[in-house]
Image (spheres, rainbow, N blue to C red):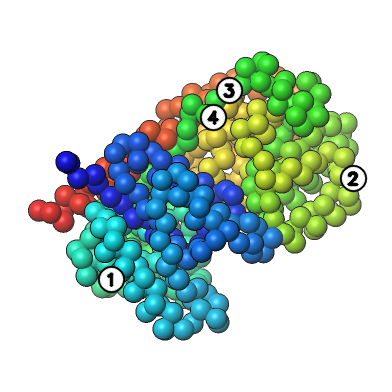
Amino acid sequence: MQHKPRVLFIVRFLWGDEGISVGLVRLAKGLMKQGWEVALASAMEEKTQADGEITRGPEWFESYGIKHFFVPFPNFRTFKGKNPSGAVQALLKLNAAVEQFKPDVINVHSLSMCPYAHAMRLFYKIPFVSTARIEPVSSRRSVQIGAFVNQYFGTFLGDRFIAISTEVKDVYEHTLKVPKENIRLICHGVDNDHFRPPSGQERLEAREAFELAPKSQVVCLIGRLDPVKGHDVLYRALAILKSGGIKVTALCAGTGGKWKDEIQTLATELGVDDCVRFLGFTDTRQVLWASDVLILPSRREGFGWVIPEAMLCGVVPLRTPSAGAIDQIEDGLNGFIFPFDDAAALALRLKQLFENEALRGQMSGAALESARQKFTADRMIKDTIAVYEEVINKGSV
């Protein structure tokens, strides 16, 4: 019987019902469809709640056939985690997982986990790949130390480094000094069978589910309730539009803690609380099907996965120039890029789209076409497997 190739994902923690959690499941499902076995090592023991967000528990991953190994990786960013014995315990647990699963390659999805993967490479000669999902903060001491090590002692980020956007690629090359020849750019891919334009009836039903009139002007912001996501920028834009006689309804999907109270208060102060719907955790596709425009006013991103999801649904994307923007949007053709914290610029673009239905339709079609060419799950899986095979074959030579 032919051996199935195996990959072990390593990540310290998985936050919420979006982002890395959903991304890892999508990647794993695609790999398994192509004949790979996938396992996950993380510091999660069960579903928990932290800072107002519910984490995905191991049972959610295992329901998809992704075997989970609990490894108590310490958090060295907190005082509690600064315990050398914790790192040793985590290393022993990871070693046991590797001995049991016997991966052909390791894919690290939290860069702080790279030292553990390095140890496995030394012990077992298993190649490892690291994936970066957000730009590093250059002022952090850990980033500065990492750049020094990469430049003078060889990279600690593995045999290959996967960047999910051009901006992330450039930052890791120039700030963290990762050798250019080790970097592979693989943008996120989306299931384009699931994320697709709705039929007329599906659009009506999606709007009815949120009690929206068929002709309502609707935008959405899909992401956790956190200052970095820029909900406040959207609300200020809504206030500008409302003062000009343009009523736009905003569907805000995502969970969060303290920030929700603050932005609800801001909506009231700006007089747009009647324009905003807080949906909590809900089905992304249904929100997109009910919307005309997606807004991503983030102050920081690694890629912005919701943008290609929206594009594949025929929803026009508007976003800030955080990471992923230049890979996704040709400004003015398939969406708009507006400056950080610029509510007036966002309001102007929304006014332009809602007053010009032909323009909105044209951009919708262009967004759909470009996403089908660049952001499908099949393309992401194919490119990821190529990187895995590259490092596996390199080690076997």
Q: Which amino acid is tagged 1?
A: Ala
Q: Residues within 10 Å of mark 3 (few under 14, many from 20)?
A: many
- The mark found on residue 197 in the picture is 3
Q: Which amino acid is tagged 4?
A: Phe
Occupied quadrant, residue 338: top right
User: Which circle's residue, 1 or 2, is located before the other in the chain?
Assistant: 1
Residue drawn at x 83%, y 38% as measured from the top left: 275
Tag 4 near tag 2, CB within 8 Å: no
User: Which circle's residue, 4 or 2, is located before the other in the chain?
Assistant: 4
- Helix, strand or loop at mark 2: loop
Residue 20 in view (yes/no) = no
The vertical placement of 340 against 284, above or below, is below
Q: CA distance from mark 4 to mark 2?
A: 34 Å
Question: Which dot, 3 or 1, sits closer to the camera?
Answer: 1
Q: Which amino acid is tagged 3?
A: Pro
Query: What residue is shown with label 2?
Result: 271
* Camera-side residue of 61 and 339: 61
Question: Which dot, 4 or 2, sits closer to the camera?
Answer: 4
Q: CA distance from mark 2 to mark 3?
A: 33 Å
**388 to the left or right of 263:** left
Residue drawn at x 54%, y 29% as measured from the top left: 195
Residue drawn at x 20%, y 65% as measured from the top left: 124
Query: What residue is shown with label 1?
Result: 119
The vertical placement of 49 against 141, above or below, is above
- The mark found on residue 195 in the picture is 4
Q: Position of residue 64 (x, y in %)?
A: 45, 44
Q: Residues within 10 Å of mark 4 (few under 14, many from 20)?
A: many
- The mark found on residue 97 in the picture is none
- Helix, strand or loop at mark 1: helix
The vertical placement of 128 against 249, above or below, is below
